[in-house]
Amino acid sequence: MPEYLPPNLDIIRPILWDSRGLRLLDQRLLPWREKYLRLRTPREVKKAIKDMVVRGAPAIGITGAIGLVLGAEKIKARSKRDFLAKLKRIGESLKKARPTAVNLSWAIDRLLQKANEADVSQDEIVEVLRAEALKIWEEDIEANKAMGRLGAELIPDEATILTHCNAGALATGGYGTAIGVIRAAHEAGKKIKVLADETRPWLQGARLTAWELKKVDIPVEVIPDVAAGFLMAQGKIQVIVVGADRIAVNGDVANKIGTYSLAVLAKENNIPFYVAAPLSTIDLATPGGQEIPIEWRDPKEVLCCAKRRIAPKGVSALNPAFDITPSPYISAIITEKSVVRAPYTKGLKSLFEV
Ligand SMILES: CSC[C@H]1O[C@H](OP(=O)(O)O)[C@H](O)[C@@H]1O
């Protein structure tokens, strides 16, 4: 059974792919159980992304791309034109799984463009798409390691680093963006330790970041989200590094809900606030944060904790999954190419100049 995996696969593997389909580490069950779900169709992949079996901007981009390949393998078409039209419909449907992270639409559009450009037979297009999906995956791991190296230079030795949500190997193709910076600083011999916001309501920090950092032997403690400001004011945090789901061309950042509050508190306490993200998360077509679509999820995610309802029946909840941090609150954006500082529009655009 051939496996389709990048050569530089990380030790933490949320995504596995072989000729029988796609296997996803079910992140809803971590840290209690390490169980893989097998998916064979784009519909199953779309549901897995929507239900957050896999989550994190680059990881859902890679997963969406593989979902498109799974669909392409099964298309019955009368002509290449018919094949491409059916492929596009599958891609457009996958894009709708989650709206905020630009990586999902970016990855799907990259494969659709590759299919349209390929001057090969319909069967050969599937091979082209499979190769492109793997290339996206491999590029993401390399990008994480490159931004890790660049970001680690910003981390003081013996620093306590606060991070929010999970921007690690579980959220990417491997190694991580914000967690990649942390891993690189640790691997460079810096005696750092991490405070992980629990990140209500989905608890990506307490459940996923703590699980990841423990696996790679990086000291980590979980804190309630609401404790971050106090710990900053007490001088217990020297630097903050978070991931991103979409970065507008002016440097405004969409990231997990709670990020904006951290950025304002960081500025108030003169603590550097860094965003680590690959170029695939930068969306030059989005002028500013107000144009980024924010996903609102099921209120039940707020109203329940550990499968028990924590609010009285008849009381609902608001559950915005992301917020927008205006660029003036961001000290720098760490990418695989360079560390970009204000003025962000010029710096971010220059990353894409050939
Ligand atoms: C490296 S992208 C990680 C990014 O995605 C997370 O959101 P979710 O868990 O809902 O997919 C969060 O915003 C992280 O910063």
Image: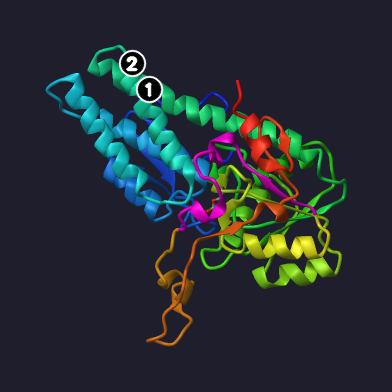
> Which SS class for mark 2?
loop
The spot of residue 300 in percent (x, y) is: 41, 72
| Residue at image location 12% in from the left, 22% down from the top | 78
Q: Amino acid at mark 1?
A: Lys
Q: Is residue 74 visible?
A: no
- The residue wearing badge 1 is 114
- Does residue 277 appear to the left or right of 161 in the view shown? left
Q: Are marks 1 and 2 in contact (CB under 8 Å)?
A: yes
- Does residue 208 appear to the left or right of 115 in the view shown? right
Q: In the rendered structure, find residue 118 and report the number of the disc placed on it.
A: 2
The spot of residue 167 in percent (x, y) is: 60, 48
The spot of residue 96 in percent (x, y) is: 34, 48
| Residue at image location 57% in from the left, 41% down from the top | 12
Give the spatial CA distance, label 1 vs label 2. 6 Å
| Residue at image location 74% in from the left, 41% down from the top | 341
Give neighbour class at mark 1: few <14, some 14-19, many 20+ (Cα, 10 Å): some
Q: Does residue 251 sit above or below 125 in this rendering? A: below
Q: Specify the segment rendered in magenta.
A: 272-294
